[in-house]
Amino acid sequence: MSIVSDAVAYILDGANWSGGVGIGTRLLEHAWYSLLAVVISAAVAVPLGLAIGHRRRGEVVVVGLVNSLRSLPTLGVLTFAVLALGLGLVPPILALVLLGIPPILAGTYAGVANAPATVVDAARAMGMRERQVLFRVEVPVALPLILGGLRNATLQVIATATVAAFVNLGGLGRYIFDGLALYSYDRVVVGAILVAVLALVADGLWALAVWASQPGTGRLRRTPRV
Amino acid sequence: MIRFDGVTKQFPDGTTAVDRLDLEIVEGAFTVFVGPSGCGKTTSMRMINRMIAPSSGRIEVDGRDVASVDPVALRRGIGYVIQSAGLLPHRTVVDNVATVPVLTGTSRRQARREAMAVLERVGLDASLATRYPAQLSGGQQQRVGVARALAADPPILLMDEPFSAVDPVVREDLQKEMLRLQADLEKTIVFVTHDIDEAVRLGDRIAVFGTGGVLQQYDTPDRVLSSPATDFVASFVGRDRGYRGLSFRDGSSVPLHPLSTTRAESATEVRLEPSEWVLVVDEADRPRGWMDVTGLEGVRAGHSIDESTAAGGSLFPEGGDLRQALDAAISSPSGIGVAVRRDGSVLGGIDATEVLAVLAAQRGTEASERSRAFTESGPAAG
Amino acid sequence: MRWLVDNFDTVLDLTGTHLYLSLLPLLIGLVIAVPVGSIIRASRWARRLTLVVASIAFTIPSLALFVTVPLIAGLRILDPLNVVIALTVYSTALLIRAVPEALDSVPPDVVDAATAMGFGRFRRTVTVELPLALPVLTAGVRVVAVTNISLVSVGSVIGIGGLGQLFTQGYQRNFPDQILAGIIAIVVLALFFDAALYLVGRLLTPWTRTRRSGGSRVVTERSAAGEPT
């Protein structure tokens, strides 16, 4: 277990945090890749999920899309993209976006489509336009599932963003790959630990968001002045 | 024989569901637990088969404390029917009914054979046996639920609002079915409902539960209606309890008068005064409707008989009770109740005031009997 | 496409290894998760604890696991057993969340009726609750199968066999065709097993195919989303 203790020692040593290739930089790079990928995935998947979920038609399309995207091997997409587009930020982000879309799409669709039909019906009967029904009724009810999908996607993206290092980018994967190349396994464990910690922190934040968004509990909502 | 001895149930959040219940149910009795929601009737029933454990007190079945026996064995000997039927969705109807016999060790083939017999008993067609519960209607599912509870021939049957989720027509069918079954099988039945009419119709004795799980009255339906023990019972039984109570009174002494009737074909020949009505009957002498002067003119002008008659009220059957007699008279457009024989043919006419006179006479007799019993055996009696 | 046709035997060979590496963990995961998942429902703290541990196991990146497991288990990194163990950890973590969720989807009044009829706990779980939980459970198993098939390929960056080899080799040799062959093979494999598991699920649940039963498809979607509860 000395490898693990070496790794922990490395992380705790302040000197290793600063500098162009320090822990701090790597963490930020990794966080940046992940954030970018999740935001783009969300930008694609959330509107799509809202639209199809609201119409409650085209479920087959969603299921098909989600299944197919989920089966795409990230490494394969990444290497293919590099050969086609050259090295750079685009290939890894593309691969990560394709990874992030399925959970977000599935969660958004499920959340909106599962909004109680009676409530939606009542909203329409009150005279709400379709867009109002979607945003004022369905989305608030669906929020926990939508955020759950985002949470899931974030987790998977953070965990997989290590592959960016395979194609000469930065991020926490660098510790893993460099460590493997140099047979310094303590370095590899450093990468593993840091990624796990980053993922847990992000997961914790999302869990909080999901909890706060439970409809009807009024958590973290401003109480209207009466 | 089921006995509740000082049974209390308090839930962790502080609510008292059942409050010091003392109750004894004799073998073969059909007992109904009735009351508003949250009054502890279901909780009490579920303590019999130990689905819920009491906070204090004991429940005895056939002299043994239910807490002292193996719960699984106890439950296999008690039939249980719930509102949503609770049928196992992944088993066919016949396998559902055969569940308990199989659990107790009967071979599946034998159990299935017995199950088919029980299905027939509850009035279900044999062709439904190989279907899945999801393919049956609500009423059919309920019957399967009852069949399943009866399959192992348990001496005790617990029924938790079994007919509440079906529509009124089906409900009445099921209630009649239940009475017929009980006449054959004579099981000890505990039946929970929130519907006082259902309780009155089915029970040999009724236990009325009030809010907070307190037993308000445990009596025959007749006495619950006529002498409610508390204000709660009086208001729960409702405003029409006097009317409902009439259903326990014999209607055989209601005088019947000859009715003026006419066949549809000879309707045009009838003569009517302005406020007179005539009863139109068919070839078998069964009532079709009432016709007054306006209707008569309509028939003479060429309108059909059906357009010209007003639908009749309820009918008073041979051997019916006072409630049926009064209702027949009140609901009839002519104010005259129609009494019919068993074959449906018209027997005579009933006057509402005469029904009330019969009621007064019955009451008078009962009052003198009560005071005679009182004077004979002293104040303690009655 | 030429590459795929020319090198079909190699691809087939790699597929065999790949399948073994991705499906064996799924099986082991099921064998562990079904009994454990059923038992932890009984106690609230056990359930919560297990879910937290599972979540943590799930957040560890696969690559990191592939590397740390051999260190802990004393195996060589290239030993395929690493991948099996690491993926078993993943599969178990995912399924141990899915099993209680699937059991929760069984209508409570059916469970109540079964208990009242005199089913002992074990018999009730095995003959009533698990069969009725199958539709939701199959959805979870399908997700794990597809994810595993995709994840195994990541291991090729540290030299582990399977179809991922086509990616690393194709990258190094600058052969996009080879990579494409790998992608196609994995996608086909994953979708095939997804469909196969779906069919098996339907076969095992004849009562859901009857006329009046409502669709549980949107429920499937929820589990397919794989979001935590």
Image (cartoon, coloured by chain):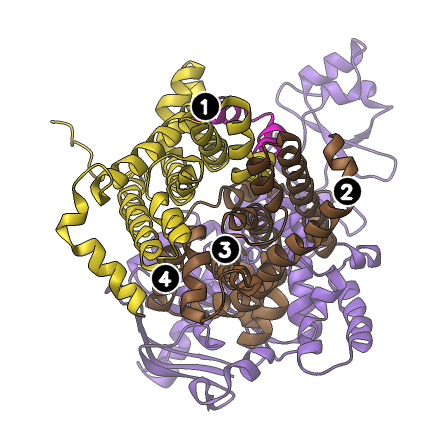
Chain colours: A yellow, B purple, C brown
**Residue C11 locus on image (x, y percent):** 72, 45
Subunit ID for the residue under disc 4: C
Gap in Å between the C-alphas at discs 4 and 1?
Answer: 32 Å
Determine whether label 3 and label 2 are within 8 Å by CB. Answer: no
- In primary-sequence order, the first of circles 3 and 4 is 4
Dot 1 crowding, Cα within 10 Å, few <14, some 14–19, many 20+: some
Please tell me whether mark 3 sits on a helix, a strand or a loop. Answer: helix
Gap in Å between the C-alphas at discs 3 and 2?
Answer: 37 Å
Rendered image: mark on residue C98: 3
Residue B255 shows in this picture:
no
Does residue C112 appear left or right of residue C191 in this picture? left
* Magenta stretch in the rendered image: A45-66
Determine whether label 3 and label 4 are within 8 Å by CB. Answer: no
- Residue type at the position of mark 1: Val
Please tell me whether mark 2 sits on a helix, a strand or a loop. Answer: helix
- Residue type at the position of mark 3: Ala
Residue tagged 4: C53
Is residue B372 shown above or below A209?
Answer: below
The total of numbered circles placed on residues is: 4
Rendered image: mark on residue C8: 2
Gap in Å between the C-alphas at discs 3 and 1?
Answer: 27 Å
Residue drawn at the location 38% of the way across and 55% of the way down: C55
> Is the residue at mark 3 from the same chain as the one at mark 4?
yes
Subunit ID for the residue under disc 3: C
